[in-house]
Image (cartoon, rainbow, N blue to C red):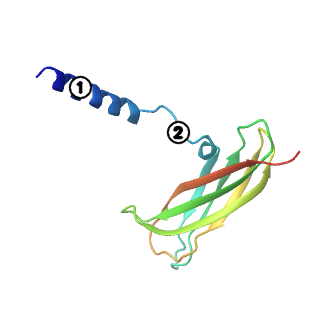
Amino acid sequence: MRLLPLTLTAALGASILTGCGSGSSDPEADDVKVTTCAADPAGGKPKAEGSIANSTTKPSGYTLRVRFLDPAGNEVSQGNTGVGRVDAGGTAVWRLEGTLSAKGAVTCKVDQVTRTAVGQ
C-alpha cells in the first residue's frame, strides 16, 4: 500500500515540475514582439505590427503567424508575414493584416515563428 502513494506522489511531482518553466521553450518566438494589435473600427481586417530582435550571431530571415482572438479567446482571423533579413543582434519591424474581417476588440498571439540563417 505504501508503494502506490509514493509512486503517485512522484508522478505528480514530475508533472508539476515539467509545467514550471522560467522562460519560453521557443527561442525563435522570444525574438518577436507585438507592439500594435487593432481591429478595424468598420469591421474590416485587423492589423498587427511589432519588432524582431535577432538574438543569434548570424543574419536570419523570419516568418511568423499571428492569430487574432476575440475577448473570449476564439480565433477570428490570422495573418502571416516574413522579414527576409535581420542582421545578427539587429532589429526589424514587421506588419501584417488578418485574412478575415473581424468586428470588435481583438488581441494578438504570435502563433508560429520560423528563423532561418541567411547568407552574409
The disc label shown at residue 24, or none: 2
**Residue at position x 23%, y 26% in the image:** 7
Q: Position of residue 4 (x, y in %)?
A: 17, 26
Q: Position of residue 76 (x, y in %)?
A: 46, 70
Q: Residue at x 73, y 37 (%)?
A: 56
Q: Earlier in the sequence, mark 1 or mark 2?
A: 1
**Whether residue 120 is situated above or below residue 106 in the rendered picture:** above
Q: Amino acid at mark 1?
A: Thr
- 40 relative position to 15: left or right: right
Out of 104 and 73, give the one closest to the viewer: 73
83 sits left or right of 102 in the view: right
Q: What residue is drawn where x is 34% and y is 29%? A: 14
Label 1 sits on residue:
7
Image quarter in which the N terminus is found? top left
The quarter holding residue 84 reads: bottom right
Q: Nearer the viewer, residue 52 or 120?
A: 120
Q: Position of residue 16 (x, y in %)?
A: 33, 32
